[in-house]
Amino acid sequence: MGRIVLDQVSKRFGDVEVIPPLDLTIEDGEFAVFVGPSGCGKSTLLRMIAGLEDLTSGNIEIDGENVTEVPPSKRGLAMVFQSYALYPHMTVRKNIGFPLRMEKMEQAEIDKRVETAAQSLNLVDYLDRKPGQLSGGQRQRVAIGRAIVRDPSAFLFDEPLSNLDAALRVGMRLEISEMHERMRTTMIYVTHDQVEAMTMANKIVVLQAGRIEQVGSPLDLYHKPQNVFVAGFIGSPKMNIFSGPEAEKHGAHTIGIRPEHTDVSMTEGTWEGRVGVAEHLGSDTFIHVHDTGLADMVTVRITGDISVKHGDKIFLTPRADQIHRFDAQGQRIA
Amino acid sequence: MSDRKLPRLLQTPAVLLLLVWMLVPLGMTLYFSFIRYVLNSLRRPEWTTPSLSNWRGFGNYEFVLKSKDFVLAIQNSLFIVCSILFLTVILGILIAVLINKSFPGQGIVRVLLISPFFVMPAVNAVLWINMILDPVLGLQGIAVAGINDLLEGLRQMPVLGGFFSLWPEFEPISFRATQTSAIAVIMMVTWQWTPFAVLIFMTSLQSEDQQQKEAAVLDGAGTWSQFRFLTLPHLGRPIAIVVMIQAIFHLSLYAEIEIVSRGNGNKNLPYLIGEFANNNIGAASATGIFAVILANIVAIFLLRMVGKTLME
Ligand SMILES: Nc1ncnc2c1ncn2[C@@H]1O[C@H](COP(=O)(O)OP(=O)(O)O)[C@@H](O)[C@H]1O
Ligand SMILES: [Mg+2]
């Protein structure tokens, strides 16, 4: 069980309102990802749910019970920190068993649970080492193990992968998704990386300056961004967004078109420009096009390879049904 | 190999200097401890110059071992040092944890806390023994007299007076006596050195990882468990440093003992050395060698103990 409801929750640090009042519901068993640029208040929001940060106003409910005044350890949540926050003087075994020891559980039962957790995380060989003797990925696993043994009603992750190198990050991403599939426990995952958000989430919450810009499934956000911010934030490479006469032609203040929804030709098309840098990934090619008169640079994405040179003339044609239109307030026009 | 030679060569003067610095005094002490060497002797004037022809073997050591104050001096050295270590570490941790929280006037409180460390040991001893511990003129004498006056007043009360007349008169304690002078020394040195411990522990506390604390809070650790399982192990190394440095310093306490009781019933090894050195340099040197051995034993023992208990 782990249905988490935020009701008009807000947070100020002194005079600065970091999180204006917001409402949010995370259903039991959901994998919710808070995503947004650095400093937008994701960690603060997560820490408020965990109880590490007091609310300035509002209420938090877990499984129908108001936990606003309940101390962190009694909320039944487990958290994995960005810096892992392992206890440096304890062995891996003691680290994982620590929450159980604090519950005054019997040693035999602790040993059993630690053993089970260690097996599922491939940590059995490292149980008697100290955190200082482990690699980044292993430390991350220990931190997850310490969360798992408590059998929490929800897991909270604060940028757990940002200290890992790219290859490990992809691996751990899969492992965490796998873990969620297996356990079906509510998870709230904070990241500034929209790729992590898109690949892992059932529900993405896009935050900007403490406000919720949009809540939805990854594909919702991709196909129907509610505003210019979400349109620019979700998707890689970024959506091309421009205002001006071209937007007015489509009856909007601003329009957006994703790089992968633009067709390319060397001879004819709607917009004309000059090739800047072309990035060849093998499977895809990203071409950055200049001098279109629309924006500084328009990015297009082509499946497969194409041979273009710097300075070549190039024509772009947006797919009409994939153009996103926004009004002067930056809101989506249906 | 050849590119190693130059750095080695450049290091040599420093290493040599250090060796000379350490080995010469130690060697001289060893040498003097095996010969008869006194400053003044009308009967045997040949003993007043150090010379191998005055070889005494282990005679000086036997003489020291048999002297009536030696065992007392060793016991006292250990008692004083261990008590001071115990008190300063406990007080240091308590105070450091207390003032590590932010509160108004923090800066001033910290400066005041450190200030005893800048008082000269002899001044410290004079202040304590005369102004604080003196049974008549010191704070102690005044306080005890005050309490006795108060009790006297209470005894005059109509009903409760009977109850208070059962209470005894309080006696001020003399800290210059044989049994108590070591306690006085422990008190004054603890007062002076607690700031040192506080300073070291506070620095260490400020480098404690806050996310670990938060993780522990979520794991259900209360204040005591956080202190026991996170803060104390984190302080393990600073505690070892405080213990080591203080052990070295306090094994050689002298001024305080001289001022409190002139060694009356309260000698430690350095004081004994001082007494022998009034004339018998040979015996003083032998005592010095005993002191070196004792210092090493204490250091090793203390380090083991601190290491074992804190690092889990
Ligand atoms: N303890 C604090 N005191 C004052 N300001 C804070 C504190 N914690 C966070 N902030 C501010 O709140 C904002 C949001 O921070 P945070 O939640 O850490 O952002 P994110 O995790 O999205 O990068 C930032 O502008 C940060 O400076
Ligand atoms: Mg953050």
Image: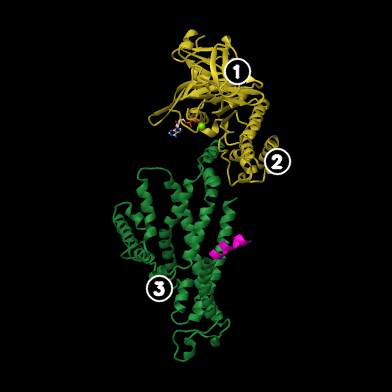
For discs 3 and 1, the disc positioned in front in the rendered view:
1
Q: Amino acid at mark 3?
A: Arg
Label 1 C-beta lies within 8 Å of the nearest ligand 1 atom: no
Camera-nearest residue between A115 and A138: A138
Q: Position of residue B156 (x, y in %)?
A: 28, 56
Q: Circle 1 marks a residue in which chain?
A: A
Please name the color used to draw chain A. Answer: yellow
Q: Amino acid at mark 2?
A: Val
Residues at circles 3 and 1 in contact by the CB criterion of under 8 Å: no
Compared across the picture, whether B301 is left or right of A119 comes to: left
| Residue B131 quadrant | bottom left
Q: Which residue is mark 3?
A: B262
Magenta stretch: give its range: B1-11
What SS does tag 2 mark? helix
Picture disc at residue A124: 2
Q: Which residue is mark 1?
A: A260
Instruction: Say if A299 sits above or below B108 in the image.
Output: above
Please name the color used to draw chain B. Answer: green
Badge 3: few (under 14), some or many (20 or more) residues near its Cα, within 10 Å? some
Camera-nearest residue between A135 and B197: A135
Picture disc at residue A190: none
